[in-house]
């Protein structure tokens, strides 16, 4: 028996045997089955870690890499427990410091108002960042701004790389990792007594110089009747909860 699947040369007469034709049909059918299976699998495969579905409730169409503040799940357990447990699907709105600090998502695709798409809530992502001071290493929501993140002393994301120079809407690579309390040293602008608050000038950098950034910090160190004088060196830490969080004085230098 000859080779039913033998190739022909240019100019040869084409004769297709029943065996060759049936083999061709079987192969074509199997390819259609494989393609259909691949499409079905692509729909049910889990999203990469840190990528979730989010609904755009900001009231406007949003661009890729815009920012939404996370308001909670689209469907709550009391509404439909089975659907709630089947997947993570969030509702997101225009960011507000008081509600969304440390609780944000960066869109991975353009998203029309009211529609559901993909967003990054953990891990590396491209983002646009407003940065006034290149010493700032962290980012979080910019109040009432869904187009960019805001650079600062603390935040839910760490800047891995950013365009040169300070300015608005700078392209950056950020690592969304949640708000981690970060200690800084600074000097009190005035005296601090137990249970009170005071403005602290933050010192930072390789040579520990005045950064020009001031924060309001609350006492979490002093006992009854104790106080710290103006210009005293203090250690401050940011505690993110309850939102939007506070700076606290947690240490001092004698």
Image (cartoon, helix red, strand yellow):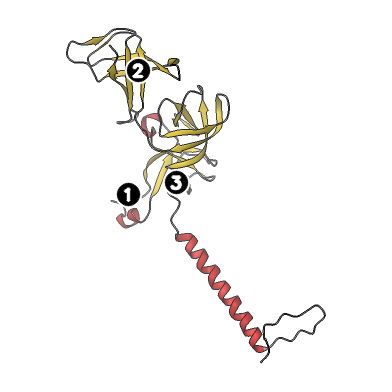
Coordinates of residue 162 in the picture (x, y in percent): 54, 31
- Number of residues whose C-alpha sits closer than 10 Å to that of mark 1, classed few (under 14), some (14–19) or many (20 or more): some
- Which secondary structure, mark 3? strand
Give how far apart the Cα atoms at labels 3 and 2 are. 35 Å
Q: Relative to 166, is 182 on the left or the right?
A: left
- The residue at the point 64 percent across, 87 percent down is 19
Query: In the image shown, does 100 or 213 lie closer to the viewer?
Result: 213
Q: Is residue 116 above or below residue 41?
A: above
- The residue at the point 51 percent across, 28 percent down is 130
**Comes first in the chain, label 3 or label 2:** 3
Which residue is under mark 2? 216
- The residue at the point 62 percent across, 82 percent down is 23
Coordinates of residue 5 in the picture (x, y in percent): 67, 82
Q: Quadrant of the N terminus?
A: bottom right
Which residue is under mark 1? 76
Q: Relative to 36, is 84 on the left or the right?
A: left
- Number of residues whose C-alpha sits closer than 10 Å to that of mark 2, classed few (under 14), some (14–19) or many (20 or more): some
**Comes first in the chain, label 1 or label 3:** 3
- The residue at the point 42 percent across, 25 percent down is 153
Coordinates of residue 62 in the picture (x, y in percent): 53, 40
Q: Quadrant of the C terminus?
A: top left
**Comes first in the chain, label 2 or label 1:** 1
Disc 3 versus disc 2: nearer the observer:
2
CB of mark 1 within 8 Å of CB of mark 3?
no
Which residue is under mark 3? 55
Give how far apart the Cα atoms at labels 1 and 3 are. 14 Å
Quadrant location of residue 166?
top right
Query: In the image shown, does 181 or 129 lie closer to the viewer?
Result: 181
Disc 2 versus disc 1: nearer the observer:
2
């Amino acid at each position: 028996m000859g080779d039913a699947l033998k190739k022909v040369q240019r100019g040869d007469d084409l004769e297709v045997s029943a065996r060759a034709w049936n083999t061709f049909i079987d192969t074509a059918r199997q390819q259609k089955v494989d393609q259909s299976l691949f499409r079905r699998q692509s729909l049910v495969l889990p999203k990469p870690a840190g990528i979730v579905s989010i609904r755009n409730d900001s009231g406007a169409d949003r661009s890729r890499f815009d920012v939404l503040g996370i308001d909670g799940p689209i469907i709550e357990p009391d509404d439909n427990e089975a659907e709630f447990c089947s997947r993570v699907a969030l509702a997101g709105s225009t960011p507000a410091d008081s509600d969304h600090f440390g609780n944000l998502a960066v869109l991975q695709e353009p998203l029309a108002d009211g529609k559901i798409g993909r967003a990054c809530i953990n891990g590396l992502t491209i983002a646009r960042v407003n940065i006034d001071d290149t010493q700032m290493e962290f980012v979080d929501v910019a109040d009432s701004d869904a187009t960019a993140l805001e650079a600062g002393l603390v935040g839910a994301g760490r800047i891995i790389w950013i365009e040169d120079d300070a300015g608005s809407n700078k392209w950056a690579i950020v690592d969304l990792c949640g708000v981690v309390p970060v200690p800084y040293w600074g000097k009190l602008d005035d005296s601090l007594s137990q249970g009170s608050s005071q403005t602290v000038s933050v010192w930072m950098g390789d040579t520990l110089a005045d950064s020009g950034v001031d924060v309001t910090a609350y006492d979490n160190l002093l006992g009854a009747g104790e106080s710290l004088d103006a210009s005293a060196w203090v250690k401050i830490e940011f505690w993110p909860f309850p939102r939007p969080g506070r700076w606290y004085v947690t240490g001092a230098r004698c």
